[in-house]
Amino acid sequence: MQAETVQKKRMLSGIKPSGELTLGSYLGAIKHWSARAEEFDCYYFMADLHAITVRQNPADLRRRTLEQLAQYIACGLDPQRNTLFIQSHVHQHAELGWVLNCYAMFGELSRMTQFKDKSAKNADNINGGLFTYPSLMAADILLYLPDFVPVGEDQKQHVELCHTIARRFNGIYGEVFKLPKPYVPKVGARIMSLTNPVAKMSKSEDADSGRVLLMDPPEQIMRQFKRAITDSDTENCVRYDKENKPGVANLMTIYSAVTGKSFEQIEAEFAGKGYGVFKPAVGEAVVEALRPIREEAAHLMKDKAYLEGVYRAGAEKASREAEKTLRKVYKKVGLLAK
């Protein structure tokens, strides 16, 4: 008698190709994704439709989308074990996004923190897409009926609104959507800027001198860490204190994430050595952690045919799953089948 096959729980996440992937993107999200293929049925996408809520240079957006796919794979996301696709290649995202706009309330959308933040930064382009961004994000999630959505702390509000919209829809039409749980990693979930350790490391702001990009050469990475902010006090002591020493705490978080060492081990390693020794050591550890990723991603970018094969196969599989949900939604709301 054959053993019964256990169906894996599904996990889904995406990152906008609105800027270059950073060390924060890797340690906060992508590094943790690759280990999950054993346990979960994983879907990961390049969220290019979300990127255009802010004006993009078209050629740069296309380049970054392909580079992001190459970097996903270089970070350990095997296309044979994970479904990798580009959001705009699966038309059901935009279609369900429109339907969910009709079940998201104006007040709910206007309260979203990211809408307020981005409106302040893009005062000359406060467009409808920026406002309804969370409805499309809800569609991204709900299409695949995932059990978990790995998100950063700053995305929890979007998942909560996704739940609100799904409950509203299910309350009217029956159990159509599954309500996924947010999945937040305990370590490295939020890597901060090296020059402003109370702000998240940014991939979209070119002026952010406190970021490290996955594709940065070693000498650039070392420069960034040598000028990283530590403390304004004169203690010069490597000790984890997030409230009073946010710069040092951020560097310790990064060092812990790339070496696997605990904060206690790090404190012992650098006892009496000061920041002049500590900062370059963190930089060197990051250089070595990113070296194989940078080299593999550069190699993959030379094989456009392979990358095209990956994203086409991923979109085909994602489309099949998404279409099942979209057909059910269309039927529930009264749209006539083709």
Image (cartoon, helix red, strand yellow):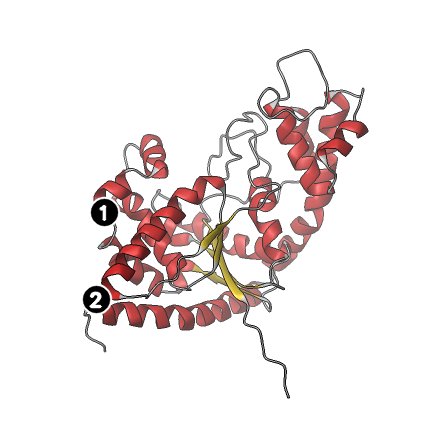
Marking on residue 316: none
Front residue of 90 and 307 = 90
Front residue of 279 and 300 = 279
Marking on residue 333: 2
Disc 2 marks a residue whose amino acid type is Val
Q: Which residue does the image show at 71% across and 27% down from the upper left?
A: 279
Quarter where residue 222 is shown: top right
Q: Quadrant of the N terminus?
A: bottom right
Residue 44 visible within the image: no
Q: At which x and y percent is residue 195?
A: 57, 25
Q: At which x and y percent is residue 187?
A: 62, 41
Whichever of callouts 1 and 2 sits on the residue coming sooner in the sequence is 1
Disc 1 marks a residue whose amino acid type is Met
Q: Is residue 160 left or right of residue 288?
A: left
Q: Quadrant of the C terminus?
A: bottom left
Quarter where residue 3 is shown: bottom right
Residue 281 visible within the image: yes
Q: Alpha carbon of mark 1 to alpha carbon of mark 2: how far?
A: 17 Å
Q: At which x and y percent is residue 291?
A: 70, 46
Residue wearing tag 1:
105
* Label 1 CA crowd tier, 10 Å (few <14, some 14–19, many 20+): few
